[in-house]
Image: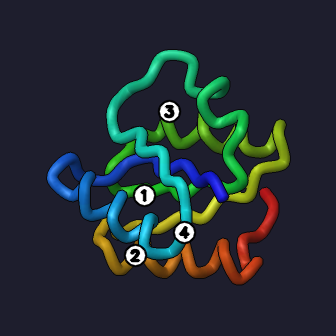
Amino acid sequence: MRISLIGGMDRLHRHYQHEAESLGIELRIFNKSVVNLSAKLEHSEAVVLFTNKVSHSARKQVMGVAQSRNIPVLQSHHCGICALRDCLNCVKAGGAGRN
């Protein structure tokens, strides 16, 4: 399963990766401005969006791409390991709603 994480803190990058690996998930992390984000999200099965660590324009872009490609998006205002774990477990359980 491939999931993209938008936002988050640089210092938690390896912890995010470790948490995803422990759940058997391939996690791609985008916590800085990225050129051609829509192409990078293309093969994701879901997107986790940490809303407190991204700009309004970045959130708008991610939501637009996700809606056009029918990719479920989970949004969290928190960006800790527990927030990521909750989102990943929700995706694995099939609880990610379509946006």
Q: In which quadrant is the C terminus drawn?
A: bottom right
Residue that label 2 marks:
83
Front of the two marks 4 and 3? 4
Residue type of the residue flagged with mark 1? Phe
Residue type of the residue flagged with mark 3? Ser
Asked where in the image residue 91 lies, by quadrant, the reply is bottom right
Q: Gap in Å between the C-alphas at discs 1 and 2?
A: 9 Å
Residue that label 4 marks:
24
| Circle 4 Cα neighbour tier, 10 Å, few/some/many (<14 / 14–19 / ≥20) | few
Residue at 15% x, 52% y: name it: 11
Give the mark nearer the N terminus: 1 vs 2: 1
| Circles 3 and 2 in contact, beta carbons < 8 Å | no
| Circle 1 Cα neighbour tier, 10 Å, few/some/many (<14 / 14–19 / ≥20) | many
In the foreground, 1 or 34: 1
Residue at 38% x, 26% y: name it: 33
Instruction: Judge left or right: residue 70 versus residue 4.
Output: right
| Circles 1 and 2 in contact, beta carbons < 8 Å | yes
Residue type of the residue flagged with mark 4? Gly
Q: In the rendered structure, find residue 50 and report the number of the disc placed on it.
A: 1
Q: Position of residue 47 (x, y in %)?
A: 61, 53
